[in-house]
Image (cartoon, coloured by chain):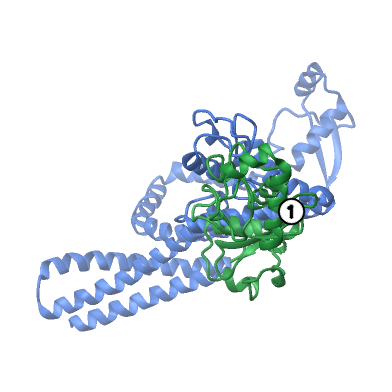
Amino acid sequence: MMTPGGSGRFKPLPTAMYAGYSGTASSWVAKTSVSASGKRIQREMAELNVDPPLDCSAGPKGDNLYHWIATIIGPLGTAYEGGIFFLDIVFPSDYPFKPPKLLFKTRIYHCNVDTAGNLSVDILRDSWSPALTITKVLQAIRSIFLKPEPYNPALPMIARLYLSDREKHDEVAKEWTLRFAK
Amino acid sequence: MVNETPLRVTGDGSKEGSIAREKNGEKAEIFISPRFKSAAAMAGWDEEDLIIASFVVDDTPERSSSKRRRRSNLLFKSTSPSSSSSRRRQRVKQSPIRLPVIDLDEVIRHEEEKSAEKKRETKTETKEEKKVLEEKKNSTSVVLPCIDKLRDELSCAICLEICFEPSTTTCGHSFCKKCLRSASDKCGRKCPKCRQLIGNGRYCTVNTVLWNTIQLLFPKEVETQRAAASSAKSPSPRNHQNQRVRSRNNRDQERLQREDLSRLFVSNEDRSERRRRGASVRLDQDGDAAFAMRLQRQEFASAFGVTATNATSSSSSSASTLLLARANLRAMASRAVRRQG
């Protein structure tokens, strides 16, 4: 199933990293078709293994190559410090021409994440580009941890608080991180 | 013949006139006429040049025998002109039988030679390709420190593989031609990298320099991608497949020939059966005549083929199979004749 030319670059994922993930790499690869999107996702996985972004990790949830789980560790020096945030990633069948759907599984106090866990990040909606990878998406999410975007909010209430009273906002965010993300 | 030439200087010790030289153990003298000498002097030739020229003339292969024969022919012609015309008549008689016979075998042999040549060519080509590949491997091993960077740089941002037939946007970003096309179809006419608008269909042209560079640097990857593309599509005649296609064509031709022969058997049997039933006799007769003609030709071909192969002592396996086929044909024909009787 894997491309013979680049087989050297594909290594089985470290299985301990992912909760729902079990078995060797070939077990789930065999069940999926080698479409363009599948190939691309495999490539991205290999890339993630070789060069993982800071504070982020991601990989297939189980047998399905198109359903991933990702974790982002709250960056140091922010209100989310020390928290581990889980995300669900679902790749559409015409990926990378359509953006992947990301959903926060861990509750978070953030102006760009609504109560259901949906993100209001432009690159996951209108500004999606097929040149973007899941690595870049995760890095973008990490960057909104460092610097929220209150002018493109999912929850305007939190955005307003963030703009008016930053200290109070951070306090609440720390509380939520302690309560839900540890 | 030389003695017959009247213009010669008598060899009375005058060394400029005659040059003695050994030939085949015999003493042969070369005489040069004074007129020729004067002409040579006018042309700026001196004695030595003349001697050398005479040697050259002497060393050329003798044609006297053929000349003599021609002469004798001429003589005969004057005395008995009927003999040559009778010969011509014989030739005319032979030609209608001979021509098709020779044609068949020569055609077969010619094709065999051609196929052998092609095989040789393909072998050499594959050898060259291997050499080139090895060189490339060596070169890649030489450039190994930056090859990973190059790989990143030359891979398409959309499929994340090495760019296959890259096309460059107006903003200067390169993607696989296919990837860029589907990206502009599904995500709008924006560059996937910088979101600039990409113009009117110009992105569909392949950046040849980049493509050649990629092919030189990553021959393996390109080959695998090409194989994947060709397997996904219906078999498309690409450059690297042409050789295979050619060889397949050769095989097809051979098969067709064989099938022709087998059709001959079949038609033979059919006809004999029809004869037993006693239906459409006239048609059968016509067909049988044609078949007999073809058989005769085959027979002649086999006869001449045998002699030819014996003479050249180059009986390949295909030739032997053809002979076998002919033998079979003959057997079938004789069986048909027996059935008739």
Q: Is residue A29 visible?
A: yes
Q: Check disc 1 and report the residue beneath it.
A: A53
Give the residue at x 11% y 71%: B281
**Image colour assigned to chain A:** green
Q: Position of residue B146 (x, y in %)?
A: 81, 47
| Quarter holding residue A2 | bottom right
Give the residue at x 46% y 73%: B321
Give the residue at x 37% y 51%: B86
Q: Does B192 sit above or below residue B289? A: above
Pick the front one: B6 or A33: A33
Question: SS class of the residue under badge 1?
Answer: loop
Tell me the blue chain: B
Q: Does B147 sit above or below residue B288? A: above
Q: Does B96 sit above or below residue B191? A: below
Residue placed farthest to the top in the image? B42
| Quarter holding residue B331 | bottom left
Q: Does B17 sit above or below residue A48? A: above
Q: Position of residue B251 (x, y in %)?
A: 47, 63
Type of amino acid at the residue the image marks with label 1:
Pro
Q: Position of residue A95 (x, y in %)?
A: 53, 52
Q: Position of residue B288 (x, y in %)?
A: 21, 69
Q: Quadrant of the N terminus of chain A?
A: bottom right
Horizontal side of B263 relative to A110 (left or right) equals left
Q: Quadrant of the C terminus of chain A?
A: bottom right
Chain letter of the residue carrying label 1 = A
Q: Is residue A47 visible?
A: no
